Amino acid sequence: MANYYDIDSILVEEEFVPVVFQKAINGVKIDESTEKGYVEQGSKTQLPFWLAHELHMRQAVSIGVPACFNQKTRLEIQADAACVDLRSRCPYFYEFGCKLAPLCDKSIGLLLAYAFRIRYKEVLHKAHTTAFAAASRFLMLLTKEETYMYEAAQSSMAAFKKWRMGGPRLQRASILGRKRKPAE
Amino acid sequence: MAGQSDSTMSLFSSEEIEFMAEDEMVEIVPNLRMDSLNFICGDYGPFYPQLAAQVPIWLALALKKRGKCTIRLPQWMSIENLTQVLEAERDSHAFQPLPFHYVEISRLLFDLAREDIPDMYMVRSLIEDIRDVRFHKVETNLEKFTASTVTWKNMSAMEVNVIRAFAGRALQAFYKHDNEQQTPDTDRTLDKQPQIPTDRPKRNLKPR
């Protein structure tokens, strides 16, 4: 997970978060339409997480709770976590939440753990029973991490079934199939 | 290549597990005279006609393919034992002790030594049933997963391998979220019980 080159962990930080500037900053524009060449104290905007995080460490901004963790989503998750469309809200719901929790709202951690526990069961259940065609609608609701889990379960089950059905016991090594290049 | 494992999804492919299973010992009755065979993994033989000998499955199958021996069915693959195991599997939540490679061994013997198995059809359907019951049990157990200790006894190689990728990811995620908040909120973690029919109508297991 914590791999430096992990593409998912880079993409997580691209998610936008609402911020409020605590300081006036010169030479920066957050809105093309304004004439002023500086940002006033107390102005609000959306910044990618990686930028907001850096500014937060310098006490330049305070980070708010993004839409995917707002009260409405929380209520929906508490009602029936398995049916909430998390993918459209934030494909990296869990990873983003983990990064965000220490910065703005500690209770996000609880929400994540709760949501994951319920949704995990749903993924488990669907991964082993549903046919692929019927599953596509369900897959639309899953976050990236859940999709990986689902695919892991499906593919190892499919591999097992393939092995059980049999087939040729001896396989040609891929290197043997090649023809030698004709001498020029 | 299909026989090799895909490093991202799971550690072993089914073919590799089958390869490991071929090291298990089995009893054969050779029909030829042969001096003992000395391999890195051990010495087998000497072989005398009609005298039983213990050899690994790969050797037994190699001899069998050449018509040099008959394979004796392992003790656990007898119909009485399998019937007992199947009933015990259905009655209890625990896994019954079976050889670690029972799925692979039975498949190898069904494929390559079918004339040595009396009541082949019955044995095969019993083992299929046992496997189905156990796989279902594995799934039920997976539902009760949390980041706390997980202890399942007597799981077989293939059962572990099928859930390896999924369970690995899930445990990692549970661990991550549980570490996120050291004090779990107890009243919110009450989840509803999974609705799994625990006892299916029992079938009469008389030999057909």
Image (spheres, coloured by chain):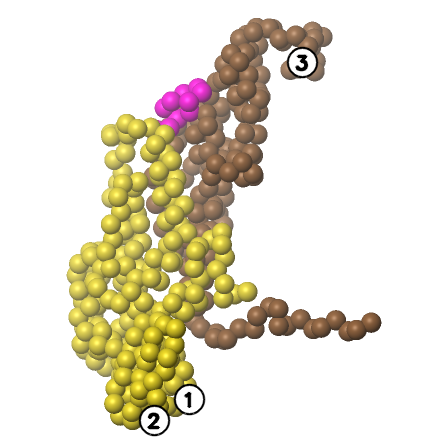
Rate crowding at label 3 as few (under 14), some (14 to 19) or many (20 or more) other CA atoms within 10 Å: some
Q: Residue at x 17, y 70 (%)?
A: B84
Q: Amino acid at mark 3?
A: Lys
Q: Nearer the viewer, residue B154 or A80?
A: B154
* Chain letter, yellow in picture: B
Residue A21 visible from this viewpoint: yes
Q: Numbered disc 3: what chain?
A: A
Type of amino acid at the residue the image marks with label 1: Arg
Residue holding disc 1 = B66
Q: Secondary structure at mark 2?
A: loop
Chain in brown on the image: A
Label 1 packing within 10 angstroms: few (<14), some (14-19), many (20+):
few
- Distance CA(mark 1)–CA(mark 3): 82 Å
Q: Which residues are magenta?
A: A101-111
Mark in front: 1 vs 3? 1
Q: Residue at x 46, y 25 (%)?
A: A100
- Magenta-colored stretch includes residue A20: no
Q: Is residue A109 magenta?
A: yes
Q: Position of residue B196 (x, y in %)?
A: 26, 52
* Residue assigned mark 3: A29
Q: Which amino acid does the dot numbered 2 rest on? A: Leu
Residue B187: x, y in percent? 24, 29
Query: Residue A162, how many percent across, how many down?
Result: 45, 67
Q: Position of residue B88 (x, y in %)?
A: 17, 64
Work out whether residue A141 or residue B76 is closer to the camera in this orientation and state it.
B76
- CB-based contact (under 8 Å), mark 3 and mark 2: no
- Residue underneath mark 2: B32
Question: Which is in the foreground here, disc 2 or disc 1?
Answer: 2
Between marks 3 and 2 in the image, the one whose residue lies nearer the viewer? 2
**Circle 1 marks a residue in which chain?**
B
Using the rendered view, name the quadrant where residue B131 is placed.
bottom left
Which chain hosts label 2? B
